[in-house]
Image (cartoon, helix red, strand yellow):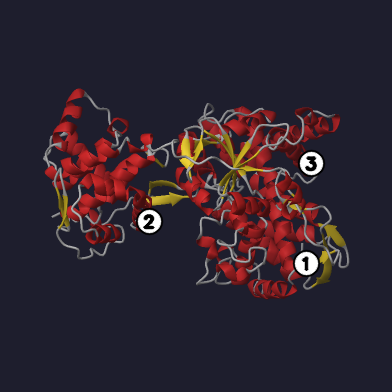
């Protein structure tokens, strides 16, 4: 007899997952919720805990099953003293489906059937899930399910009750036509199978009846979006300091998760903020929001169209998968010797007693590493021009705080020439002869993808791709400046980080495996807290492509929303005493970062692809600095202020004074 440890909800999720793009087949959220609850009720019936017909659902045995997804549902049914229909229970329990889906996906990942990717994508695990769990079959979990269903539909094999239920539920979601090429005979076969089993008919009928429910639950009861008076902006101390996350936390605490600002000479701006918003965007953003509208003008500045930040859907997933190795922690870990050499080369110029502007010091330190690692060229002579042009382009085309002609001034035209210089250097350095024996870099990956599919990645997009790789020095550099400020501003913490650094470097240069929380616990938690309290990109923009409701508020089709995902970083109910720099937040039992309110790398499908690279590079830099030097904040009485546009960074007044050289720096 075939061993099958998968539940009906496992199999339903596997059937609905589209391996090509890492998404579920486009099943509206309510429809999917109803189908998932139908699968749970059917599983309970097969386990003889309940029974059902077209009129009623009966409790047979309240004994827990031991399944975390099933038992809460069984308990709720058992607690109700009234005999009700399956349709009633599907409608009542549908809001619980999201937690069941989470448990189901976790189980499938743990079973090595699915692999989870950054940005909440799932694909078939590379291990192919081969094990005795499928009776020794070489099939993966998803192949195991789809093979059975295919045989039942197209080979006229007699399906067992489980397969009938799966076919009924998938059919109610109307996605068979996206999975298979259906002719009239196949459609009749599906209809015939759906009528073979009383349980399957009952559950499917109840699910189908509920599918139209949300259409009639919308808009009539939606809440009016509150408008923030402009005087609130003038008196807000966090806005005056440039602390955008804390400012939006203040507004969220007072006005709720959805609110509007109405500038006197502009269109109303809708903002979403708070942990529940973050949860919604992570789960549902891909169905209702898109990125390309707000980003299109910016990418045109570089002559591009359809670059990674502006893509959505299957193309976005494909490009992320193609570029994932280039932005991976593994790629950086394999080249740490290069990182050590570049950092030490920069640090040899630091003099004890001197004070250096934090932003420019850290940006140039990071670019000295990023440029050879990402595109295998040196760019310190042009990086300032690249950064200045990019920031002006963001301020004119994304943030729109400057008129567009400000990008065409003589100074900006001169700086724009640095882009051509960079492109020429990359192309000259990436001939077959020049790259022979060299480790693969990001430019190699982009050029290879362009060569294999020039329509998907045209040559016109390469300029943006290579420039963006170096512009990462802005974000990484600013994150490093905040981390070094956090360390220097807390002398006791700096001493603890230095102790970890001294142990780490005591026996030579560590490899990537040494940078783990067990060896650098204090540094790791300091970095997490720095990213919380000083997030580099505090907000994102999207356009509503499908009208929806969020937290009871209607978001109309075509409207633009500003998602302040880091507002939750400063909300007391998510991070108690949020203005306190407290690295113990990340220890048990607190573990405050496990809330959806912790979002330093963005949300959903557009979550930063290089977050793991960034974590390692920042940590290596902080520990190298701590091992060789003691830093002080300059001036000594300086209170941190922020420069918020186009991204969050310390104000230009912040400097780091080299107070002490602890160990010699060997270039």
| Dot in front, 3 or 2 | 2
Whole-percent x, y for residue 295 in the image: 62, 33
Whole-percent x, y for residue 155 in the image: 15, 34
Q: Nearer the viewer, residue 558 or 457?
A: 558
Instruction: Name the residue carrying label 1.
Output: 665
Instruction: Name the residue carrying label 2.
Output: 106
Q: Is residue 198 left or right of residue 523?
A: left
- Per the model, the C-alpha gap separating discs 3 and 2 is 46 Å
Figure quadrant of the N terminus: bottom left
* Vertical order, 479 against 431 (above or below): below
Say which mark, if any, is on residue 382: 3
Question: Are circles 1 and 3 on residues that touch, CB within 8 Å?
Answer: no
Q: Mark 3, residues whose alpha carbon is within 10 Å: few (<14), some, or many (≥20)? A: some
Which residue, as the protein is rendered here, is positioned at the far top?
184
Q: Which secondary structure, mark 3? A: loop
Q: Which secondary structure, mark 1? A: loop
Which residue, as the protein is rendered here, is positioned at the far right?
353
N-terminal-most mark, 1 or 2: 2
């Amino acid at each position: 007899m075939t061993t099958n440890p998968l539940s009906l909800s496992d199999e339903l999720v596997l059937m609905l997952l589209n391996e090509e793009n890492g998404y579920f087949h486009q099943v509206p959220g309510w429809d999917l919720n109803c189908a998932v609850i139908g699968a749970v009720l059917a599983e309970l019936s097969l386990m003889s805990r309940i029974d059902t017909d077209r009129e009623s659902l009966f409790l047979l045995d309240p004994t827990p099953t031991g399944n975390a997804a099933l038992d809460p549902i069984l308990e709720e049914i058992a607690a109700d003293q009234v005999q009700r229909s399956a349709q009633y229970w599907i409608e009542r329990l549908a809001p619980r489906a999201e937690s069941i889906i989470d448990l189901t996906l976790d189980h499938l990942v743990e079973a090595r059937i699915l692999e989870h990717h950054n940005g909440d994508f799932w694909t078939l695990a590379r291990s192919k899930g081969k094990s005795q769990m499928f009776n020794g079959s070489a099939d993966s979990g998803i192949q195991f399910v789809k093979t059975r269903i295919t045989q039942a539909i197209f080979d006229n094999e007699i399906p067992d009750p489980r397969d009938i239920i799966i076919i009924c539920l998938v059919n109610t979601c109307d996605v068979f036509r996206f999975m298979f090429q259906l002719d009239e005979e196949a459609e009749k076969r599906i209809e015939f199978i759906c009528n073979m089993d009383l349980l399957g008919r009952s559950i499917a009928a109840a699910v189908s009846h509920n599918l139209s429910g949300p259409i009639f639950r919308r808009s009539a009861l939606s809440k009016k979006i509150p408008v923030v008076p402009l005087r609130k902006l003038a008196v807000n101390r966090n806005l005056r300091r440039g602390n955008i996350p804390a400012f939006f936390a203040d507004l969220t605490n007072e006005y709720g998760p959805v609110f509007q600002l109405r500038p006197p000479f502009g269109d109303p701006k809708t903002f979403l903020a708070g942990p529940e918003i973050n949860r919604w965007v992570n789960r549902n953003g891909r169905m209702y929001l898109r990125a390309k509208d707000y980003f299109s003008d910016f990418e045109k500045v570089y002559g591009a169209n359809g670059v990674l930040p502006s893509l959505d859907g299957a193309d976005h997933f494909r490009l992320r998968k193609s570029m994932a190795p280039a932005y991976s922690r593994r790629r950086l870990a394999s080249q740490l010797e290069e990182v050590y050499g570049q950092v030490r080369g920069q640090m040899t110029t630091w003099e004890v007693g001197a004070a250096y502007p934090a932003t420019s010091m850290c940006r140039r330190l990071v670019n000295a590493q990023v440029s050879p690692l990402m595109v295998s060229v040196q760019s310190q002579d042009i990086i300032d021009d690249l950064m200045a042009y990019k920031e002006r382009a963001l301020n004119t085309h994304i943030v729109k705080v400057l008129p567009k002609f400000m990008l065409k001034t003589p100074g900006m035209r001169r700086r724009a020439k640095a882009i051509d210089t960079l492109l020429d250097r990359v192309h000259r350095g990436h001939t077959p002869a020049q790259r022979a024996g060299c480790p693969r870099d990001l430019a190699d990956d982009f050029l290879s993808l362009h060569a294999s599919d020039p329509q998907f990645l045209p040559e016109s997009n390469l300029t943006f791709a290579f420039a963006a790789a170096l512009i990462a020095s802005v974000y990484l550099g600013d994150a490093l400046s905040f981390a070094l400020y956090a360390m220097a501003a807390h002398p006791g913490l700096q001493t603890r980080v230095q102790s970890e650094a001294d142990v780490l470097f005591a026996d030579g240069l560590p490899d990537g495996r040494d940078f783990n929380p067990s060896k650098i616990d204090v540094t790791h938690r300091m970095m997490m807290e720095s990213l919380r309290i000083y997030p580099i990109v505090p907000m994102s923009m999207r356009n509503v492509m499908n009208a929806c409701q969020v937290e009871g508020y209607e978001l109309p089709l075509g409207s633009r929303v500003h998602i302040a995902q880091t507002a939750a970083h400063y909300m007391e109910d998510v991070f108690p005493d949020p203005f306190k720099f407290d690295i113990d937040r990340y220890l048990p039992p607190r573990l405050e970062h496990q809330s959806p309110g912790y979002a330093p790398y963005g949300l959903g499908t557009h979550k930063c692809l290089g977050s793991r690279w960034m974590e390692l590079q920042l940590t290596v830099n902080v520990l190298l600095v701590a091992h060789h030097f003691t830093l002080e904040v300059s001036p000594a009485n300086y209170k941190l202020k922020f420069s918020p546009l186009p991204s969050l960074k310390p104000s230009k007044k912040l400097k780091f004074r080299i107070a002490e050289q602890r160990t010699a720096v060997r270039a």
